């Protein structure tokens, strides 16, 4: 296994905000953004069902469907395959939902359903190659060991497992089956012993507690691909169609000043945050300190790389007058996408990437 290079010191990692205790839905305190990688104890957790108790000794990954030779792999067998490491930013498609008005159903995430980690595992491509994929294969379904009955937004006919699919091209390109996060074995909350990492896609595709992979010749129609985590896509001249949520939108978020925090009037204050995109890399971040009237370019703290956020900052000369100020950040990517000023209602409670208004208070300096 290749050695991780970064420093994962997590001694001072801040505690997660509990949005739901069981199953665990925990949010990163985004204002505490520090290094480029999120320490594992501070990385958000999004789980639909209770964490399945899996034993590394008996757990196996079953590979079937359109495979020429179905496989059953143990963790030892996977660890013996060539390992690969990649860093990726993962955002929950519902991140920022609390900023929507009217309120949308679902976990009321603030800014912290996003994080960046260094993942180590085997390439899905290598596992598929070992299994031998037959002609006509279209998608790979990734199925977790966790299950339950859902009643919202639709009712399932009894218990179902968490599952999502990726097109075969994406599966062969860069999908990772990870057993380590920031150089440590996965924790139960993050999918022990094995999870998918789908670079550039919203988190729902990164199936945790992987237990089965299978290849299909038709588009997968499971709950988390159709009833949930999908949206109405406008078709040119045709009726809109329901399509699964996939690629992350371009987005910048302000970490500091923290929402509702205070800064001193008539001083220089740092505005700092991170920006990411699912396509290409982030090329520009602008900040508005007047509620979106005017914009100033921020400076990047990290180089441009695909799939991983760039931290950025800006020295802000705060106004002399004490009062309330609305800060916003807006990113643009190399695919030419930029953040739109409002939320497109067809996205429902997902893909929330309009520039979020962050209110801070300017307090008088010397008095
Ligand atoms: N098996 C399984 N995988 C899952 C989920 C789940 O509930 N069960 N949640 C998904 C969602 S919606 C997100 S955003 C990410 C969150 O990964 P994390 O908990 O490691 O941050 O896991 C995805 N993979
Ligand atoms: Mo998510």
Image: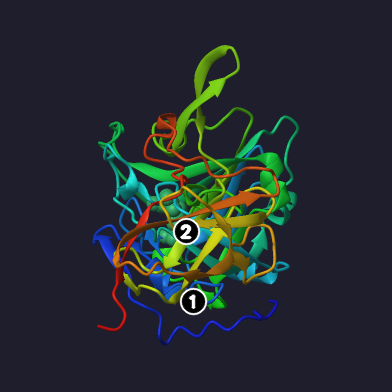
* 152 lies above or below 43: above
Closest to the observer: 215 or 138? 138
Q: Position of residue 199 (x, y in %)?
A: 61, 54
* Some atom of ligand 1 lies within 8 Å of the CB belonging to the residue at label 1: no
User: In the figure, residue 309 lies in which quadrant?
Assistant: bottom right
Q: Determine whether 128 is above or below 89 in the image.
A: above
The residue closer to the viewer here, 14 or 150, is 14
Tag 1 near tag 2, CB within 8 Å: no
Look at the numbered disc 2 and say if its residue's Cβ is closer than 8 Å to ligand 1.
Answer: no
| SS type, badge 2 | strand
Residue 135 - label: none
User: Could one spot residue 191 in this view of the protein?
Assistant: no
| Frontmost residue, 216 versus 259 | 259
Callout 1 secondary element: loop
Q: Is residue 238 visible?
A: yes
Specify the quadrant that holds the N terminus.
bottom right
- The residue carrying mark 1 is 34
Q: Which quadrant of the figure contains the C terminus?
A: bottom left
Name the residue located 40 percent from the left edge and 85 percent from the top edge.
Answer: 12
Q: Quick check: 293 left or right of 364?
A: right
> Which residue is tagged 2?
253
Label whose residue precedes the other's in the sequence (1 or 2): 1
Tell me residue 143's x, y (percent): 49, 47
């Amino acid at each position: 296994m290749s050695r991780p290079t970064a420093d994962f010191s997590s001694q001072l990692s801040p505690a997660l905000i509990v949005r739901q205790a069981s199953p665990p839905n925990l949010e990163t305190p985004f204002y505490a953004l520090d290094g480029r990688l999120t320490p594992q104890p501070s990385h958000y957790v999004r789980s639909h069902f209770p964490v399945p108790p899996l034993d590394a000794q008996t757990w196996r990954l079953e590979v079937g469907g359109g495979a020429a030779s179905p496989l059953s792999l143990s963790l030892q067998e996977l660890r013996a395959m060539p390992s690969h490491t990649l860093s990726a930013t993962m955002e929950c498609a519902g991140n920022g939902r609390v900023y929507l008005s009217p309120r949308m159903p679902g976990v009321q995430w603030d800014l912290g359903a996003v994080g960046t980690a260094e993942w180590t595992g085997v390439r899905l491509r290598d596992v598929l190659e070992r299994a031998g994929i037959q002609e006509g294969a279209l998608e790979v379904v990734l199925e977790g060991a966790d299950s339950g009955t859902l009643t919202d937004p639709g009712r399932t006919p009894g218990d179902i497992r968490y599952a999502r699919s990726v097109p075969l091209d994406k599966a062969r390109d860069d999908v990772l089956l990870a057993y380590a996060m920031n150089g440590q074995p996965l924790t139960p909350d993050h999918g022990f012993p094995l999870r998918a990492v789908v670079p550039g896609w919203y988190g729902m595709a990164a199936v945790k507690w992987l237990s089965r992979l299978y290849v299909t010749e038709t588009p997968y129609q499971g709950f988390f691909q159709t009833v949930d985590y999908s949206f109405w896509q406008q078709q040119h001249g045709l009726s809109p169609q329901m399509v699964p949520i996939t690629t992350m939108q371009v987005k910048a978020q302000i970490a500091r000043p923290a929402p509702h925090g205070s800064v001193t009037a008539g001083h220089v204050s740092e505005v700092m945050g991170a920006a990411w995109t699912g396509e290409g890399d982030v090329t520009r971040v602008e900040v508005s300190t007047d509620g979106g009237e005017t914009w100033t370019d921020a400076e990047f703290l990290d180089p441009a790389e695909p799939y991983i956020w760039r931290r950025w900052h800006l020295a802000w000369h705060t106004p002399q007058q004490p009062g309330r100020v609305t800060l916003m950040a807006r990113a643009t990517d190399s695919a030419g996408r930029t953040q739109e000023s409002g939320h497109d209602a067809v996205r429902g409670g997902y893909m929330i990437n309009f520039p979020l208004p962050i209110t801070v208070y300017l307090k008088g300096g010397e008095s």
